[in-house]
Image (tube, rainbow, N blue to C red):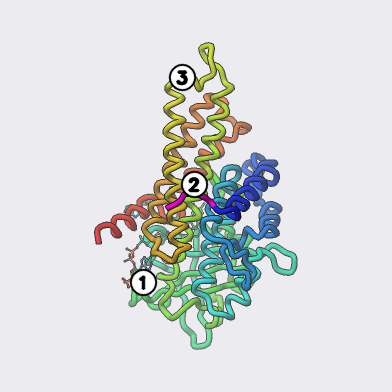
Amino acid sequence: MHFQLTEEQLMIQKAARDFAQTECLPGVIERDELQKFPKEQISKLADLGFMGMMVKPEYGGSGMDTVSYVLAMEEISKIDASVSVVMSVNNSLVCYGLQEYGSEEQKQKYLTPLAQGKKDGELYIGAFLLSEPEAGSDATSQRTTAEDKGDHYLINGIKNWITNGNSASVYLVIAQTDAAKGSKGINAFIVEKNWPGVSVGAKENKLGIRGSDTHSISFQDVKVPKENRIGEDGFGFKFAMKTLAGGRIGIASQALGIASGAYELALAYSKQRKAFGKEIMHHQAIQFKLADMATKIEASRLLCLKAAYEKDQHIDYTLSSSMAKVFASETAMWTATEAVQIHGGYGFVKEYHVERLMRDAKITQIYEGTSEVQRIVISRSILK
Ligand code: CAA
Ligand code: FAD
């Protein structure tokens, strides 16, 4: 066992770190305040090959491994988690789901431009539509229906909380075809945003990741050709679960980045701020907070990298991705809160960045399966 990154992985990490500093840091406070979608940043990330990192080059991707993806997600998330969530959804839910389970035609038609993040020079990204007003954690209770009409399906219903809801061109939609069959009656479809019957609801006004656009999406008699179903009839719930196992590595890495971003700011601040005649880093209470932060962040990083390694080695990573997500997201929330504490009153205002990291951290405990859901997955795995 060795803990060394390859030269290529180090290069990708550095490229992401530089990108975050030069392209994401300027304007991050304003984008958060105004809830402005980071279009320019996503477009440049696409040009760098970061929107389809793990997709094979023959489908327009960069052919990188999941370890590199974790490294890049951490670096971008240190500065702007609104940028990294867009990146995470496109890479690990949309592109990964299509590469792994899509047909050859679907890969040619949809995956190739999605992995490039561009089509005809315009931004071209995807969204993953599982959650509904009454089906979040309880994801098998799908109310959205996909009626089998022979050569096509007719989709009706509402999806909630959709990241990239307005900016995406392509939606991966999970819907119920045969309620009597329970989770085996669910299908997944590729739906284009501009098809008749698809409408985008108002943008949510959020606590954190405010630059990302979150919308409800409704479907009224949306005609979807049969060739746009992903996998066999009834594969939709398994598709969602398998894809989410990979997605959770992305969100765990996002949480890791938020935590390490907050820690780096707190560490630097503790070296310059003086109280009681010395820099606050000389007070043991501050030293112990920093020690705990560094330890929890290192543990989070190792869990993320282990899950990524298992995915790259085609070992079942369902358990490790849930462990990484629950631990890293709880570390992010705790670390960012303590980073605000270390900054004192300055931590409570926007220009010191830690208050944003604290607000952004919270969502990592909720989306792609709440911390409680991760504990369900983990306990089922260790008890079986
Ligand atoms: N791989 C393959 N199959 C799986 C699976 C997996 N990881 N997990 C479950 N399944 C299968 C089960 O084996 C079962 O099939 P069989 O009947 O053939 O055995 C079927 O799916 C139903 O599974 P469960 O009985 O375990 O289902 P459940 O109702 O108990 O739910 C759950 C399990 C883990 C709670 C699941 O519903 C879940 O993950 N909920 C959370 C949903 C979620 O994460 N949503 C995220 C939305 S996307 C998002 O949030 C994006 C973003 O913010 C950026
Ligand atoms: P509920 O499922 O109603 O849960 C409420 C509380 O009950 C939670 O604390 C939960 O953990 C707990 N709970 C529920 N069941 C159990 C149980 N069995 N045992 C113990 N505790 C339980 N979804 C998408 O499909 N695509 C997206 O792109 C997307 N992006 C999102 C972006 C944002 C900003 C947000 C806020 C959400 C997004 N979601 C997305 C939805 C997200 O995945 C759900 O909010 C999440 O899965 C939780 O579902 P819920 O909100 O319905 O909460």
Residue at screen point 44% across, 80% down: 232
- The yes-or-no answer for disc 1 within 8 Å of ligand 1 is yes
**Up-down: is 281 above or below 90?**
above
Callout 3: helix, strand or loop? loop
Q: Which is nearer the N-term, disc 3 or disc 2?
A: 2
Residue 250 screen position, x and y as percent: 50, 55
Q: Farthest residue toward the top?
A: 277
Numbered disc in front, either 3 or 1: 3
Q: Write the start and end of the magenta stretch as one range.
A: 1-5
- Per the image, the residue denoted by label 1 is 183
* Residue beneath disc 3: 283
Do the CB atoms of the residues marked 1 and 2 lie less than 8 Å apart? no
* Residue 227 seen anywhere in this rendered image of the structure: yes
Residue at the disc numbered 2: 255
**Residue 380 within the segment the image draws in magenta:** no
Q: Which SS class for mark 2?
A: helix
Mark 3 and mark 2 residues within 8 Å of each other at the beta carbon: no
Disc 3 Cβ-to-ligand 2 distance below 8 Å:
no
Placement of 197 over or under 17, stated as above or below: below
